[in-house]
Image: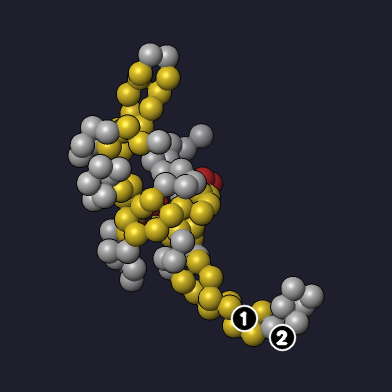
């Protein structure tokens, strides 16, 4: 299994690409592809045929997956990008922000 430093629900910062500097919440993590879908980032236009959900059809804007190497977790304390570390607290492994040392929930 691959080790991925972000999880669904995390708030991340985009550090490369067309959306550099944006932040958003992780909606989905695609472990096999090393990618994540982030709210409001990497928007693409999808052409859809008319169906029962969308009787009109047309062009829909939606988020596309972005590679996790282009994402950094936001520090819960300072709201700035940080690297992620792991440590044992008792018998539980927890993630923490390397910048502030604060635990990531």
* Residue 83 appears anywhere in the view: no
* Residue 30: % across, % down: 53, 50
Q: Which residue is mark 2?
A: 56
Question: First in sequence: mark 2 or mark 1?
Answer: 1
- Quick check: 40 left or right of 70? right
* Residue 46 appears anywhere in the view: yes
Please tell me whether mark 1 sits on a helix, a strand or a loop.
strand
Q: For the point 58% across and 78% down, which residue is it?
A: 60
Q: Residues within 10 Å of mark 2 (few under 14, many from 20)?
A: few
Q: For the point 33% across and 47% down, which residue is it?
A: 73
* Residue 7: % across, % down: 46, 43
Q: Name the quarter where the C terminus is drawn.
A: top left
Up/down of 10 relative to 105, above or below: below
Q: For the point 46% across and 61% down, which residue is it?
A: 39
Q: Quadrant of residue 13?
A: bottom left
Q: Which residue is mark 1?
A: 47
Name the outermost residue toward the right.
52
Q: For the point 34% across and 68% down, which residue is it?
A: 19
* Residue 65: % across, % down: 48, 60
Q: Quadrant of residue 20?
A: bottom left
- Quick check: 47 left or right of 6? right
Q: Nearer the viewer, residue 5 or 2?
A: 5
Number of the front mark, 2 or 1: 2
Q: Residues within 10 Å of mark 1 (few under 14, many from 20)?
A: few
- Quick check: 80 left or right of 93? left
CA distance for labels 2 and 1: 11 Å
């Amino acid at each position: 299994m691959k080790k991925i430093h972000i999880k669904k629900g995390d708030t991340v910062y985009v550090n490369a690409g067309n959306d550099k500097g944006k932040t958003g919440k992780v909606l989905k993590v695609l472990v096999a592809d090393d990618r994540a879908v982030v709210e409001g980032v990497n928007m693409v236009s999808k052409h859809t045929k008319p169906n029962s959900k969308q009787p009109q059809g047309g062009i829909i804007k939606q988020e596309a997956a972005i590679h996790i190497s282009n994402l950094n977790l936001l520090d819960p304390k300072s709201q700035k990008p940080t690297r992620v570390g792991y440590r044992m607290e008792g018998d539980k492994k927890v993630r923490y922000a390397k910048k502030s040392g604060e635990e990531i929930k």
